[in-house]
Image (tube, rainbow, N blue to C red):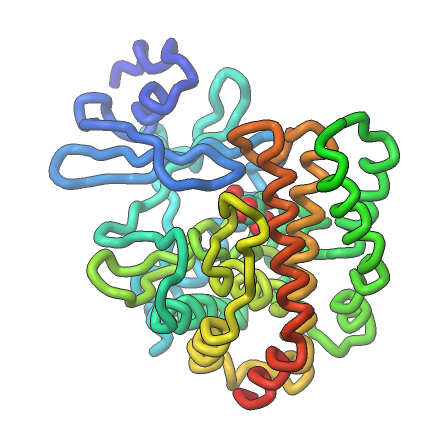
Amino acid sequence: MNTEPLARSEPTAVGIAAFFTVPENIISVQPHGCGLINDSYLVRCHAGEAFLLQRLNPVVFPEPAKLMNNLRRISEHLSHKARTTKLDPGRQIIRLLPTRIGEDCHYDRDNACWRALNFIENSRVLTRITAEEQARAAGVALGRFQALIHDLAPSQLYDPLPTLHVTPCVVRAYDEVAAISTVTGPEAELSFCHNFIQHRRTTAAVLEQARARGVLPERVIHGDPKLSNILFAHDSDLPLALIDLDTVKPGLTQYDVGDCLRSCCNRAGENPADPDEAEFDLDLARALLIGYFEEMRALLTYSDFAYFYDAVRLISFELGIRFFNDYLSGNCYFKVADPEHNLRRALTQFRLTASIEAQETRIRLIVSELT
Ligand code: GN1
Ligand code: MG
């Protein structure tokens, strides 16, 4: 096979796609999705075929080989489930598609890692939840994924981001960056964020202390079960799959449940025009938890239930700090549309945290009613 033209191609998506399939097979390569870290493209091919092409962000994921190992391990686990149990993963199985020379991925001349994954057709993502049925479906998607991987030993996976979802580490990172940041911005908003963090920093260890005491077990978690990582059927509110397996890692189930709740139960979404629009919706939370418990109830302990309130409060707080840290560091981690984007994102998550705190009693009641 003549690979001469490919070897000279630019590190652009169109050029890179040709490392995964012959160029004549490609119809189009279009940017896809709204991820804040990696670049994704949908490659449409002849005969109705399509695949997802992704460039891993080398700043966030400096050891792509280990990440690819995780992906292979999870994919094998889900395939095994499909063959041997009634827990049918359906369309959950995300598969790596090899390059034309049989490698897992392609490294471009800047040494960035590109990979191809199967594309799940007839699916859609929701930008916001508009109905309780959708929230229930989101809970089912998370619960089904967790149930499928509950017997995958955490020790089998590499931790791609060891400080992610360990909130005290995120607060420590804030202390470091706040001490040296030279970023100047709107005074009132900056003070609001600093004060918000100061008033709550002593609560940052609530889940980690429970982990250290052995109250909460370490499991494999998805790590990023936000709304835009849940695939729904294109013509109904049926959940198809939880995608984006880059942050699957050893951790606490609570962070996953909290993340799914904070992302799905805020009707204003992650990017409202005004951060004050963020609000935690109890009806959506109840519906989501009903769906989640349908799939996961038998695998949870009473202690797990006891920490779900802390989880949703903490993960919103943690994500707010992460956005704020990035703002203070000059926006080098999350993609931004403008220099204040991360500040608005942080404010949104902090408003959401405050809304969750204001409804603590009712959230705890919902969890206990469903326990
Ligand atoms: C990032 O890349 P993406 O969009 O899937 C982030 C998550 C955040 C999320 C907020 C590796 O996810 O932790 O919760 O943005 N992923 C990483 O939208 O930091
Ligand atoms: Mg992600």
Left or right of 83 in this view: 26: left
Q: Residue at x 14, y 41 (%)?
A: 48
- Front residue of this view, candidates 322 and 292: 322
Q: Residue at x 56, y 68 (%)?
A: 257
Q: Residue at x 56, y 88 (%)?
A: 371
In the image, residue 32 sits, relative to residue 339, either above or below, namely below
Q: Is residue 61 visible?
A: no
Left or right of 132 in this view: 152: right
Residue at the left extreme? 47
- Front residue of this view, candidates 193 and 107: 193
Q: Quadrant of the N terminus?
A: top left
Q: Quadrant of residue 3?
A: top left
Q: Is residue 332 visible?
A: yes
The percent coordinates of residue 348 (x first, y second) are 60, 50
In the image, residue 94 sits, relative to residue 237, either above or below, namely above
In the image, residue 117 sits, relative to residue 198, either above or below, namely above
Left or right of 187 in this view: 281: left
Q: Residue at x 35, y 37 (%)?
A: 32
The percent coordinates of residue 220 (x first, y second) are 59, 64
